[in-house]
Amino acid sequence: MTVLLTGYDPFGEYEVNPTEALAERLDGRTVAGQEVEGVVLPVVFDRTYGEFIEHFERHSPDAVISLGLAGGRNAVSVERVGINVNDTESTPDNADEAPHNEPILDGPDAYFATIPVVGIVEDLIEAGIPARVSNSAGTHLCNNILYATRHYVETNDLDVPSGFIHVPLSAEQAADRAADTAVHAESVEPSLPLSMQERAVETAIETTVEALRKTPSSTA
């Protein structure tokens, strides 16, 4: 069994994206007895989905968990739903493209994540990691890959659970950003240490693999 884990490049105002480091750290690691294939996707609307498909077809994963950065959030957010809209608002992608109110693909209005969203949050909280269920993945590339992955799985009739997790700034990143702007301590942005984020992703994989093993059709 293989778990495909995707992160993203830095983008916009963020010179560092902790999900890039998380995907790289976990690449090749064995978690819950399963191999993790970690890949980093570009923050470019015209490239992300195509590169994802290449990685999916290369690794033939049994589950997909995608990661993205959500600056300003103070907990790991497991997304419940992806909607069929690209809308960059004030942040263009890294190719300076800024779609507005455009469909992602020719498909339904929304897809629900099929990883165990609530179970992951419960396990994270039990492990002492701040976490919550989120009902909005936004309308940028985080939502895009959640929706597009589910669409790919559904239209190809694949039994592969997939979902998306937002992580806050890393503590190291928040400290650097505070130092760069000389802000007061009470103005430092919400964050979690990268090591805690790493444990959170491992826990999410473990919970997902456990759910797969309990599924009658699973051969894991």
Image (tube, grey):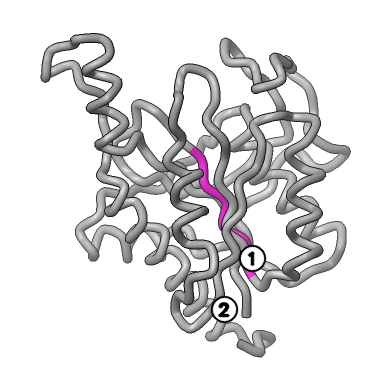
Q: Earlier in the sequence, mark 2 or mark 1?
A: 1
Query: In the structure shown, which secondary structural element does the residue marked by tag 2 occupy?
Result: helix
Q: CA distance from mark 2 to mark 1?
A: 8 Å
Amino acid at dot 1: Pro
Residue count near mark 1 (Cα–Cα under 10 Å), binned few <14, some 14–19, many ≥20: many
Magenta-highlighted residues: 63-68
- Give the left or right position of residue 6, taking residue 61 as reference: left
Q: Main secondary structure of the magenta part?
A: strand
Q: Magenta span has 125? A: no
Q: Please state the horizontal and vertical placement of residue 216, each as a whole percent of the image.
A: 63, 88
- Residue 158 is situated, as x and y percent measured from the top left of the image, at 79, 69
Given residues 191 and 116, the one toward you in this image is 191
41 left or right of 152 in image: left
Quarter of the image where the N terminus is located: bottom right
Examine the rendered structure and indicate whether residue 15 appears above or below residue 220: above
In the image, residue 69 lies at what x, y percent?
46, 36
Q: Secondary structure at mark 1?
A: loop
What residue does disc 1 label? 161
The reply to whether callout 2 and callout 1 are in contact (CB within 8 Å) is yes
Residue under the point 52% across and 35% down: 136
Residue 40 bears which disc, if any? none
**CA neighbours of label 2 inside 10 A, class few (<14), some (14 to 19), many (20+):** many
Residue located at (69% from left, 44% from top) = 147
| Picture layout, residue 220 above or below residue 63 | below
Residue 212: which numbered mark, if any?
Answer: 2
Q: Decide: is 146 above or below 157.
A: above
At label 2, the amino acid type is Leu
Quadrant into which the C terminus falls:
bottom right
